[in-house]
Amino acid sequence: MSLRITTRWREIGPLNDADAPERRADRATLAELELAVGDSVLTRAEDSLSGEIRHHAILSANPLAEWLVWKWWRLCFEPKQTTRQVPGWLEAHRMANAGGGWLWPNLEFASDGVRMCIGARASAASAHQPLRYLSSDHAVIPLVDFERAIDDFVARVIEQLSRQRVVNADLPAMYQELQAERADPEVAIYRRLEALLGFDPDECPDDRVVALYQDAQGLGLEAVAELAAGAGSSPLSARQLRAWARSQGCESARESRLGWVGQGYRVDHRLPAWRNGVKAAHALRAQERVADAAIGNRQLAEWFAVPDTLFDDQRHNKALAYELAFESNKSRVLLRSRWQAGRRFEVARLLGDVLLQADPELLHLATAQNTYRQKLQRAFAAELLCPIEALSEWLAGDFSDDAIQGAADTFGVSPMTVTVQLLNNRMLQSDELNGLDPDWAVA
């Protein structure tokens, strides 16, 4: 499936040369605008006056194109937060904020850096508006397809402006600048880090982005991008991570860790993160010939080359769990959870992160963010420690609190992990997940 933005240009009278360029640009690009993904029409609406239901809304394409260009970096790279919302996230990810005085559809765009979720919300039944949007659906598409659709749409709007001889419109220059930024590797990295921190272009203090950029030279861009995601105004520095690792970390012998036999597992980014995580957990269990058996502390500790006393250690880092290499064969591991089940889950996440990255990295993080990499980790750890087939057999249809607690004790995970496994595999229902595609809900 891919995003389609259809523009059927409306006939307009002669433009008034005395009007401001913005007003002329908006009028010149008046269109029957329709957004759809596959068979799902996201702009289905009812005309409140005539009662007519149609798949499009009559809107100006110019302000929407400007908003998409201006917010492009944040739309593509800033994940939705799970706990606290970074200030300005909704303004950057909801089409209702495109402005210009138009009644935009209630669409929200949430990227995990690899895939884009587009959610539509129906207008409130009590809304006294000339157009009431009816679509209440969501779709998940590859991020590259979203980028392609936006490029195609903006190019058509610019072409229409040229056809209508609108000069001095802002959009062509804005889009040209965006294309130049995307084509320049260093500028693209800067803009991506800026967006991950929750800032529009040039609105983040330079020192924060420069510090992250410098850290990326030593720790790797992808690891630092995970560190930046959702950090807002106070991202952690490489210096702070090293200091914590030296003072609080548990030593791990990297060369003694479990690795893939043969070619191992390769992440297929065409798949949702959770599918890759589950498949990788199955592959590792098969390699180690543990079938559906519960994995004990000693075995998990051996796999990650840490002492099994780590699971009972009360030292913890309040910020996040991570592993940081100091030498080619030595690293230090810090965990965030105080509880054994949580610490086991974090070690499993870090193990998965190490195994599933294509290139070796010095830093591996387990955070609460909704990036593709973090979702993959969580799915891997859940299925590795608490495989759904073994869990289903153990519960035998009993989903009471006592049964869930018993299963959690058996597999060495938290009751929350058991519950999430049941929800993700549709063995339990939740109002939060009802009707939501598991490819997005758990990915």
Image (tube, grey):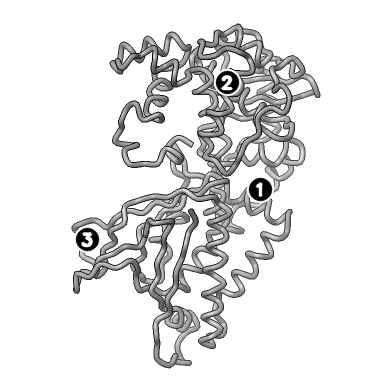
Closer mark to the observer between disc 3 and disc 2: 2
**In this figure, which residue is indicated by the disc labeled 2?**
348
**In this figure, which residue is indicated by the disc labeled 1?**
209
Q: Position of residue 295 (x, y in %)?
A: 54, 11
Which numbered disc, 3 or 1, marks the residue that appears first in the sequence? Answer: 3
Q: Position of residue 92 (x, y in %)?
A: 47, 56
Location of residue 412 with respect to 282 vertically, above or below:
above
Cα gap from disc 3 to disc 2, whole angstroms: 48 Å
Foreground: 3 or 346? 3
Which numbered disc, 3 or 2, marks the residue that appears first in the sequence? Answer: 3
Checking the image for residue 127, the label placed there is 3
Type of amino acid at the residue the image marks with label 2: Ala
Horizontally, residue 173 falls left or right of residue 64, namely right
Q: Position of residue 218 (x, y in %)?
A: 76, 37
Total residue callouts: 3
Location of residue 234 with respect to 56 vertically, above or below:
above
Q: Position of residue 347 (x, y in %)?
A: 59, 19
| One can see residue 83 in this view | no
Horizontally, residue 395 falls left or right of residue 241, namely left
Type of amino acid at the residue the image marks with label 1: Val
Horizontally, residue 291 falls left or right of residue 427, namely right
Residue at image point 70% right, 27% down: 242
Secondary structure state at the residue bearing disc 1: helix
Residue at image point 65% right, 67% down: 177
Q: Residues within 10 Å of mark 1 (few under 14, many from 20)?
A: many
Type of amino acid at the residue the image marks with label 3: Ala
Cα gap from disc 2 to disc 1, whole angstroms: 31 Å
Location of residue 307 with respect to 230 vertically, above or below:
above
Secondary structure state at the residue bearing disc 3: loop
Closer mark to the observer between disc 3 and disc 1: 3
